[in-house]
């Protein structure tokens, strides 16, 4: 049985893709399934944490015992995350769209004449924003989906974003990570790089939840 060692802790998790509207019926999205993020939320809740799961549009069922806040765009996701503060820890599993359509059309764009040209604008970086927030959680964990130089890229990302840990995974199509049931990751922290061999996303989530519980334990009295 898992210990209830996160009882009394409040933890924010993001999951899924974001949808960036083009017009009222079309959007830009990505292949994130939300499986890993939802598994992380479930694993933290199983250890007794009060979990707020801010999720983009996914097929996954709401994990038991978790408060789910459904969002669509990156900007909605950031607003929901900021509204969830303060928290003891935050885990950013979502595959947030890097760009949105600069000005989404108010009406469905008609097929007439030349195809439309979509001007893109950069989305806010939610992980970096919360890592530098006045109410920064004690522990901030990012994910990094890479297709090459996984560990080096993740180390640089950890520095750049200002988070404590990065869980890095290889999402090359051959790995089947996106939408698949399994994941193989590296945990990058200031202590170095730890390789976690291929396992079910639920097992990776359970291992991460155990590490988070250990990191949030108050230091032993002298
Ligand atoms: O830069 P990259 O998208 O690879 O970084 C991945 C990490 O940053 C993930 O933890 C993801 O949830 C987070 N992220 C974010 N907001 C963005 C882009 C990424 O929170 N706009």
Image (tube, rainbow, N blue to C red):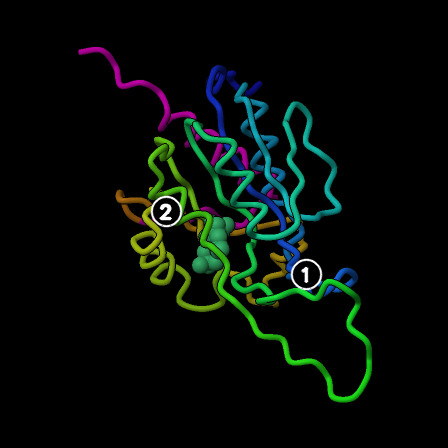
Measured as percent of width and height from the top left, residue 163 is found at 35, 45
Q: Nearer the viewer, residue 105 or 192?
A: 105
Secondary structure of the residue carrying numbered label 2: strand
For the residues labelled 1 and 2, the Cα–Cα distance comes to: 38 Å
Measured as percent of width and height from the top left, residue 152 is found at 34, 62
**Residue drawn 43% across and 27% down?**
86
Q: Is residue 166 above or below residue 39?
A: below
Which of the numbered marks, if any, corresponds to residue 192?
Answer: none
Q: What residue is pinned by disc 2?
A: 194
Measured as percent of width and height from the top left, residue 197 is found at 49, 49
Q: Is residue 14 visible?
A: yes
Secondary structure of the residue carrying numbered label 1: strand
The part of the chain drawn in magenta is 193-222
Q: Nearer the viewer, residue 5 or 174?
A: 5
Q: Earlier in the sequence, mark 1 or mark 2?
A: 1
Queried whether the magenta region covers residue 203, the answer comes back as yes
Q: Is residue 23 above or below residue 85?
A: below
**Residue drawn 64% across and 80% down?**
117
**Closer to the camera: disc 1 or disc 2?**
1
Queried whether the magenta region covers residue 179, the answer comes back as no
Sort mark 1 into few (<14), some (14-19) or many (20+) by Cα contacts within 10 Å: many
Q: What residue is pinned by disc 1?
A: 21
Measured as percent of width and height from the top left, residue 107 is found at 78, 65
Q: Is residue 144 visible?
A: no
Sort mark 2 into few (<14), some (14-19) or many (20+) by Cα contacts within 10 Å: few
**Residue drawn 28% across and 47% down?**
192
Q: Quadrant of the N terminus?
A: top right
């Amino acid at each position: 049985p898992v210990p209830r060692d996160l009882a009394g802790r409040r933890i924010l998790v993001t999951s899924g893709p974001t949808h960036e509207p083009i017009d009222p019926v079309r959007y830009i999205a990505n292949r994130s399934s939300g499986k890993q993020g939802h598994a992380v939320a479930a694993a933290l809740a199983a250890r007794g944490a009060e979990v707020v799961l801010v999720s983009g549009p996914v097929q996954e069922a709401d994990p038991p015992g978790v408060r789910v806040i459904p969002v669509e765009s990156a900007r909605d996701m950031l607003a929901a995350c900021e509204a969830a503060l303060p928290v003891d820890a935050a885990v950013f599993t979502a595959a947030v769209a890097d760009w949105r359509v600069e000005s989404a059309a108010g009406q469905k764009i008609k097929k007439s004449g030349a195809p439309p040209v979509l001007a893109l604008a950069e989305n806010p970086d939610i992980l970096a924003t919360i890592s530098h927030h006045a109410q920064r959680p004690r522990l901030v964990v990012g994910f990094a989906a890479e297709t090459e130089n996984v560990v080096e890229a993740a180390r640089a990302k950890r520095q750049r974003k200002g988070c404590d840990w990065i869980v890095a995974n290889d999402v090359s199509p051959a790995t089947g990570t996106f939408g698949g049931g399994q994941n193989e990751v590296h945990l990058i922290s200031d202590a170095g790089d730890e390789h976690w061999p291929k396992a079910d996303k639920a097992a990776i989530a359970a291992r991460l939840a155990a590490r988070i519980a250990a990191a949030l334990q108050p230091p032993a009295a002298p």
